[in-house]
Amino acid sequence: MPQVEECVKMSNFVSVEDLPLKIVEQLLKRASYFKNGGQPPKFKQPVYAANLFFENSTRTHCSFEMAERKLGLTVIPFDPATSSVKKGESLYDTLLALNSIGVQLAVIRHPQNNYYLPLLDLAPTQQLNLGIVNAGDGSGQHPSQSLLDMLTIKEQFGHFAGLKIAIIGDLTNSRVARSNMQLLQRLGAEIYFSGPQYWYDAAEFGQYGQYLPLDQLIEQMDVVMLLRVQHERHQSEDQFDVTAYHQQYGLTKERYRKMKDDAIIMHPGPINRGVELDSDLVEAPKSRFAEQMRNGVFVRMAMLEAVINGRKLGGI
């Protein structure tokens, strides 16, 4: 096992936007180590973590908790619905309470973009001292999903440079799209966008890749990355036609047959079956949906370990 001093060290883990590529490579290597049976470090002292999910989640929430348990952390249960948040307590004061009773790591999913910025830039009078791991902020960043996607792509192709990757669907509301386009561009991939044009903002997305209709892309792509239609973030759903969306922008069986032999399908989940993806294709040979979820545990182990190392927790 690599020595602790060789591992990644971070005080917090909130974004992949400016994450050095050397660190990305080390994290993916460490995640692969865990996936292949490598043992986590043996902590000499307990490490206490809490998962604060202010938005509904299955994959990310359970995956982080599995990662924490595999690392040997002690997880302190937290449910916003039964917490003092319901009494109007601020996020900072919630974290201050948890920190005061001994919580050292906080994994946070929050609907507000960049919720973590004031937590990282504390006023001189504030005493918060715990690691922040971003499990998704609004439509901003989703670093753990991005890294598990990178691991899945690397396992398939062994590299990123020159790969043609299409990101398709609800771009406007997707933190996955933003995290992935930022990281994939720096890794050398060619990025394309598709889906409803009213969800494509050329000013924001155009610097990362071009927009093309799906049927012009499907035969050329190495990775077809579908995004969930986020019904809960749209003001009006009265005009949304599931069948029409699937036929025009979804991965149908006909489009699946046109994909390259070694191309793969990805989706961050949860899947709207029959909308972004034909239900019969969710576990098709080219789909990596289940593998993405498996990889998420090991990537999150590597992320948590990096913050533990950076904060010198656990007595190691």
Image (spheres, grey):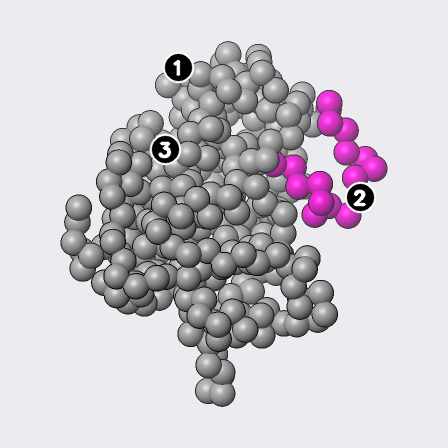
Which residue was labeled with disc 3?
153
User: Could you tell me the amino acid type at mark 2?
Assistant: Ser
Residue at 46% x, 48% y is 65
Q: Which residue is mark 1?
A: 261
Secondary structure state at the residue bearing disc 2: loop
Find numbered disc 1 in the image and state the secondary structure of the residue it sits on: loop
CA gap, disc 1 to disc 2? 39 Å
What kind of element bears circle 3? helix
In front of the other: 70 or 278: 70
Does label 1 or label 3 sit earlier along the sequence?
3
- Give, as a three-letter code, the residue at label 1: Asp
**Residue 312 located left or right of residue 258:** left
Q: Quadrant of residue 187?
A: top left
The residue drawn where x is 20% and y is 57% is 4
Choose between 308 and 181: the one closer to the eye.
308
Mark 1 closeness class: few <14, some 14–19, many ≥20 residues within 10 Å: few
Q: Which residue is mark 2?
A: 236
